[in-house]
Image (tube, rainbow, N blue to C red):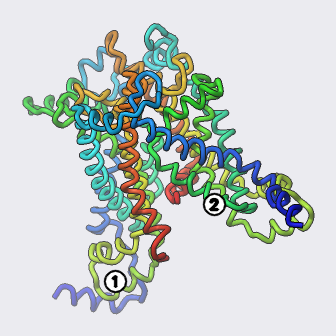
Amino acid sequence: MSQARRPSRLFKNISAKLASLPMVLTALVVFLGGTLWTVLYSFTDSKLLPRLRFVGLDQYERLWATERWLVSIQNLAIYGLLSLVFSFVIGFLLAALLDQKIRFESAFRTIFLYPFALSFIVTGLVWQWILNPDFGVQQIVRDLGWTSFTFDPLYDADIVIYGVLFAGLWQGTGLIMCLMLAGLRGIDEDIWKAARVDGIPMWKTYLFIVIPMMRPVFITTLVIVMSGIVRVYDLVVAQTGGGPGIASEVPAKYVYEFMFRAQNLGQGFAASTMMLLSVAIVLIPWAYFEFGGKKHG
Amino acid sequence: MAERGTHAFAAGEPRGTRPRRALSGRNIMIYGALGVMALYYLLPLYVMIVTSLKGMPEIRLGNIFAPPVEITFQPWVKAWSEACTGLNCDGLSRGFWNSVRITVPSVVLSIIIASVNGYALANWRFKGANAFFTILIFGAFIPYQVMLYPLVILLREMGIYGTLWGLVMVHTIFGMPILTLLFRNYFSAIPEELFKAARVDGAGFWGIYFRIMLPMSLPIFVVALILQITGIWNDFLFGVVYTKPDLYPMTVQLNNIVNSVQGVKEYNVNMAATLLTGLVPLAVYFVSGKLFVRGIAAGAVKG
């Protein structure tokens, strides 16, 4: 009997299993397999084609000795930290303002969110034009009479990453506002009433009651924003092309250049593994709190 | 003192909350702040439109915020049908049609596959299904760069590297985590009695999917549609990596046109081209309205 039962268990739900095949293959072959493959080959000296000749940590040593990579990491750190702080602050403030039972709420929301529908390429090109020193913001202020005014982030290696930040914030804060607004709407009205009865000023209610209650929303938003930041690529390509010089390079661009331009696969693999590592540092604690350990809510 | 006066006055009035005055200091602050922010968000769109309607001489003389003195649609025509990338001078129209040819099958295929996946996960859970699903969701956070090259090899082995279908497959793969999650959650919310009743009546996997689930889930299909159209249309990285120049999607071609180092920079043509590329997702956004918000909110609760 047991022999007859075993095949039937395998073929039970056979349609569902067949239908899930794309998902299973994607998960196992592409996501799991591809990741392991890249990590494995990052320890080899692959050049034009991948080959399995292991060289230990050579690629990583070279990576961390390359000026361009160090600049990329530094840029990512500055861009990431500032865009995190500013997009959270601006996004939350906008959401809080929209939550004041105002008129034209949906009009305002539409305006704040539309850049999010645009691609990073479009975003980068528009801001390249606005920050153009000969025609854009700098020239306008000069025309107003302040002739020594300089504001040309895209041509100044020291501040170019802030120019990219401007564009990135413009594109992305709408999303955060939307998530925060959803979080604010999830707060029970009674809490506001109780706070009002107790005479707690509004900003205190936000700071000490509402924001702590929105912790789950903040954490999810944080994870989404951070994994987006690590990927930043198109924006830089469109807005600055990594320039001036290598001043606005980012890791994702480094990987692309080494894999598909410089034909130095090993370097590309090592760099992308570092990117994976940085995501894992964020993701694993989050997954632990969310799914493992003690559950709350 | 003044306060007490108003209180005494208010006591004589009917009870209940007082109607708010439209021009209280608080309201002025709120609307002022929102208005300033709205200006910041609208400015780039305004600059794009204004620049694309000016002639080059006017751009060189004036500033980018000035409205056009003489409106011309020449830059739009040029961007669409004459702008050059390298030796090709047939304009953005080629990229536009490439993007259409890429987006339509990618959207259709990814939604079909993900909806069936989600349905299987919600209603026909088999052993190990959740493990695969967890890997899939985690995969959504892995930087694409890690999987770029293995996919090149995979597509090359399948003989579709550099072709349209290769790119379609890549979009289907990377759209899968979020779409599967979306559909799984939606189908899970449909009452189980319905599913059980259909089972009792003898309907199988596909019968239930087509007769019961599909007709009930139009909203989620629309959300998925919005998410995928904008996402795939706006893609740049996959287009660059997995296609050849004559198949480049619109975003890639746009970048090549605007950032080409040869020739005189024609800012009006560039801005017209940029607007043209943004037009499709913007149209989707403005038409879909609340559903778009729902789509990204659904996308946000990954995991």
> Which of the pair B168/B103 is nearer the observer?
B168
On screen, residue B167 versus residue B38, left or right, reads right
Query: What's the residue at 75%, 49% (across, down)?
Result: A19
Which residue position is annotated with label 1? A196
When the figure is inspected, residue B21 is found, relative to residue A74, above or below; the finding is: below
What is the distance, in whole Å, between disc 1 and disc 2 at their CAs? 46 Å
The chain letter under disc 1 is A
The chain letter under disc 2 is B
When the figure is inspected, residue A146 is found, relative to residue B1, above or below; the finding is: above
Looking at the rendered image, the quarter that the N terminus of chain B falls into is bottom left
At label 2, which amino acid type do we have? Asn
Q: Position of residue A185 (x, y in %)?
A: 46, 69
Q: Quadrant of residue A286?
A: bottom left
**Residue B198 in view here:** no
When the figure is inspected, residue A217 is found, relative to residue B142, above or below; the finding is: below
Q: Position of residue B285 (x, y in %)?
A: 53, 44
Looking at the image, the residue that sits furthest to the top is: B87
Q: Position of residue A200 (x, y in %)?
A: 28, 82
Looking at the image, the residue that sits furthest to the right is: B201
Label 1 neighbour load within 10 Å: few <14, some 14-19, many 20+: few
Which residue position is annotated with label 2? B130
